[in-house]
Image (cartoon, rainbow, N blue to C red):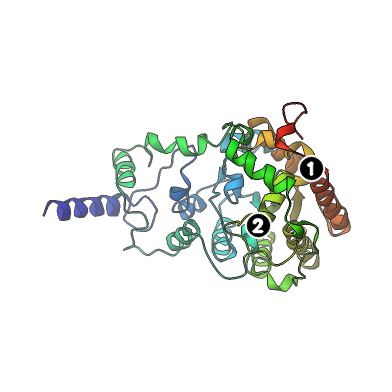
Amino acid sequence: MLPVLYGMALCALLMIVDPYDLRPWGLSPILVDAEYPPDKTVNLIRVVARQPHDLVMFGGSTTMPFTAPRLNAVFGSKSAVNLSYMAPMPTDTAPVLLRLVETPGLKRLIVAVDFSEMRRDGDTFYLGGSAVTSLRAHWYDMPDFTRPVARASLNRLWGRAFDIPGWRGEVTALVDAPSVTTHTDYMALLNDAVSHPDPAMDAQASAIACAAYPYLTQVLLPVGRAALQRGVHIDIVFPPIPFQTYYNWQKNHLEFSSWEKGAHHRQLVGFYGCIVKTIAAAHLANVTVHATDTDRRLTDLADYRDTVHLTKSATLTAMLQDIRDRTTVVTPESLDAFGRLIDEGIADVRTWRWSDRRSSPPR
């Protein structure tokens, strides 16, 4: 009977504290002014969306390191929050962003669009599935029935924030982590991909109609129009990656991807172009698109903790400053130039070799 009684006690605690704000009788949520782990963040979206915030960031793992203090410092906001989690896809991004647009006092919504948003199969990663489940949960649901959540709920029961100290480390560790250049396994993978590239690196991308991307019809247009009605500005951000990574994507299987035949980087540029053209055709004057990967300062391998994730603090700030200062904005008129810049960046690293790194500066 002891496990049964223990489970009942946890259930009663969560029903009383109600950390995810599902029940009319629950305690008012009190969140710590810091980042939560991604698996907790997805369950807190509805809580955050009911509290005042003037700036909200949403994206995948590439934007998880951007803390609220960094966002506030760069954009001059007062109550920023970052609700990014790994591998969002159109199926879960749509309900999440539509809820976030309703955040009281929201003025700016920064939305990073990774390659996972290219998916056309209706699939969802488990974190995105948790986000949708939590947003649609009823009073009798238990989105996260675990011991850490129970411990954090005890803190809330005693009048403190819904939090435990162990939750701080996961996001903090993403900033200024050791560079990918210190990991020989990653570097060997990149070196092989660049020195022996897949033949498809130079192939034309398969033609995919913009209408085939659910992100445009299910996410971009409804969210953009809802934000326009509420006077919210949206910054769509194409996160930067090292140009060597494109070679790796082409040669090695990539989880969460939705590639067709041909050069992957050109397919990604084509998808990004669809976003730019759709915004213009819909006359969404409140939406600006930023191709931050056109800033070569943000594509140095030494600033990444692996092949896709920025880690260095100064570079994270520089990326936000690009968005703030509109230095990497892409429009329908500059789409061709954007594509050429990506092609040029890939061509520039074709002679890159990891064995040359000791005698030449990082590119």
Res. 240 in view: no
| Horizontal side of residue 109 vs 345, given as left or right | left
What residue sits right under mark 2 in the picture?
Answer: 115
Mark 1 or mark 2: whose residue is earlier in sequence: 2
Residue 187, image quadrant: top right
Q: Is residue 306 above or below residue 196?
A: above
- Say left or right for 102 vs 297: left
Front-most of residues 135 and 116 = 116
At a point 34% along the width and 52% down the height, the residue shown is 18
Q: Which mark is residue 358?
A: none
Q: Residue at x 74, y 70 (%)?
A: 210
Q: How many marks?
A: 2
Dot 2, how many residues are within 10 Å of its Cα: few (below 14), some (14-19), or many (20+)? many
Q: Nearer the viewer, residue 347 or 280?
A: 347
The residue drawn where x is 34% and y is 62% is: 139
Between marks 1 and 2 in the image, the one whose residue lies nearer the viewer = 1
Q: Is residue 11 visible?
A: yes
Is residue 351 toward the left or the right of residue 311 in the image?
right
Query: Residue 27's x, y, as percent?
Result: 34, 49
Q: Secondary structure at mark 2?
A: helix
Question: 41 above or below 120?
Answer: above
From what the image shows, is residue 357 above or below residue 83? above
Residue 216: quadrant of the picture: bottom right
Q: What residue does disc 1 label? A: 349
Q: Name the kind of residue labelled 1 in the image.
A: Val
Q: Residues within 10 Å of mark 1 (few under 14, many from 20)?
A: some
**Kind of element beneath mark 1:** loop
> Label 2 amino acid?
Phe
**Which residue is farthest top?**
359
333 to the left or right of 43: right
**Are the two marked residues, 1 and 2, in contact with CB atoms closer than 8 angstroms?**
no
The alpha-carbon separation of the residues under discs 1 and 2 comes to 21 Å
